[in-house]
Image (cartoon, rainbow, N blue to C red):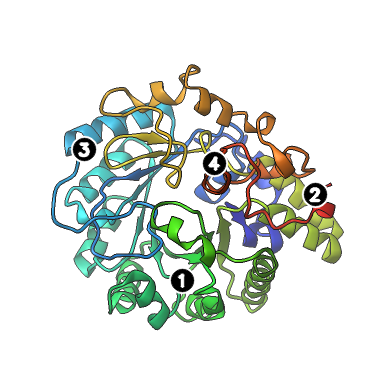
Amino acid sequence: MIGISKLYCGQAEASDALRYGRESGRLPSRLLQFSKDKKPVIVWNMTRRCNLKCLHCYARAAPLEGGDDISTGQARSMIDDLSAYGAPVLLFSGGEPLAREDLTELASHATQRGMRAVISTNGTLITKAKARELKAVGLSYVGISLDGLERVHDRFRCVPGAFQKALAGIANCQAEGLKVGLRFTITRGNVNELPGIFRLLREREVPRACFYHLVYSGRGSNLIREDLDHRTTRETLDLIMDETRALFEAGHPKEILTVDNHADGPYVWMRLLQEDKKRADEVYTLLQFNEGNSSGRGIGCVSWDGKVHADQFWREHSFGNVLERPFSRIWDDPDIELLAKLKDKKTHVKGRCAGCRYLNICGGNFRARAEACYGDPWAEDPACYLTDEEIA
């Protein structure tokens, strides 16, 4: 996760993170990416059920009908363990998390145990009453997925009307004073929608947006050819920086992040070297704090069936099951070879990643993409768009 507004527009300084000692339990949410202890943020895919049929769904979501593998009681026990372990954030995802009737009960339990609770949703089921419930339990943030304006978004979601229902969900959250933001997965089929998304951020007064690079997982595995080429990726990062700066200078600052390609960090730094050398130096310090991709260390995933993964996209490897063993014991088990290596993956990556000058601020990027393309989790990430000359 690369904070474009924090880095490029100067909305964060190294002193901001140092003021809190860089301990994840003390840092505000906006600075968690700079923590030094890297207690894992947990993505819990609490259900596989969903009311949409998104083309790029990493969970290969199932219809709304049916049950869930983890009961409310089992979920509460899992949350107790995560809280005691020190996980700072629990992100409720799916499928569609609002498909579960106990979402607000479990989110409330997480906040009562001192965790920050956030949800990742398609937004279509957030009625006024549901937004009121979510606000009442102390939810920190609601991330609503939009993958373009109306025509493109509804095509991605395979359900007509999904866009307008998502906008209604955003408005319902805003009416209750609940922080809400957008999530956008970038592909060839929707990259031209980005200027429209930035207009929507301003017009709808949405304070935050996360732009996700495509990860080849779940149904997204069928979209590898829809990923941007390296040249277009660079152009897209420039556009995101330009749009973010324009909003900032117009007096409408937004929190803008890119996710799932940590080459973005060095790319932002290289641009700043040409524009503001002093700021570039500060940004390099922040990127060192960030450390790049943190799968298996600073982020973890619990699937709908209780299996533990390094992140929500990489389901080819499971380290155990919370229905059989507490997450805390699984996560710290030195005998789980892959998990242990992920905590020090800079010594294991191969190819261009192994000799890259930015390895300490990128962390080797996404292992899920490397394995999807090359069959080797330690191969170079094919989505890295930096040239051989830039990384030498």
Of residues 389 and 177, the one nearer the viewer is: 389
Mark found first going from the N terminus, 1 or 4: 1
In this rendering, is residue 167 above or below 216? below
Taking the image as shown, residue 373 lies to the left or right of residue 231, namely: left
Q: How crowded is mark 2: few (under 14 residues within 10 Å), some or many (20 or more)?
A: some
Q: Which of marks 2 and 3 is in front?
A: 2
Is the residue marked by circle 4 packed among few (<14), some (14-19), or many (20+) residues within 10 Å? few
Residue type, mark 1 in image: Val
Q: Residue at x 18, y 47 (%)?
A: 102
Q: In this view, does 376 lie above or below 211?
A: above
Tags 2 and 3 touching, CB below 8 Å: no
Q: Quadrant of residue 35?
A: top right
Residue 56 position in % (x across, y down)? 41, 61
Image vertical order of residue 86 relative to residue 382, above or below: above
Give the residue type that dot 3 points to: Ile
The mark nearer the N terminus, 3 or 4, is 3
The three-letter code of the residue at mark 4 reads: Gly
Q: Which amino acid does label 2 sit on?
A: Ile
Foreground residue among 208 and 237:
237
Q: Is residue 144 above or below residue 339?
A: below
| Residue at far front of view | 375
The residue to which callout 2 is attached is 391
Tag 1 near tag 4, CB within 8 Å? no
Q: Which mark is residue 375?
A: 4
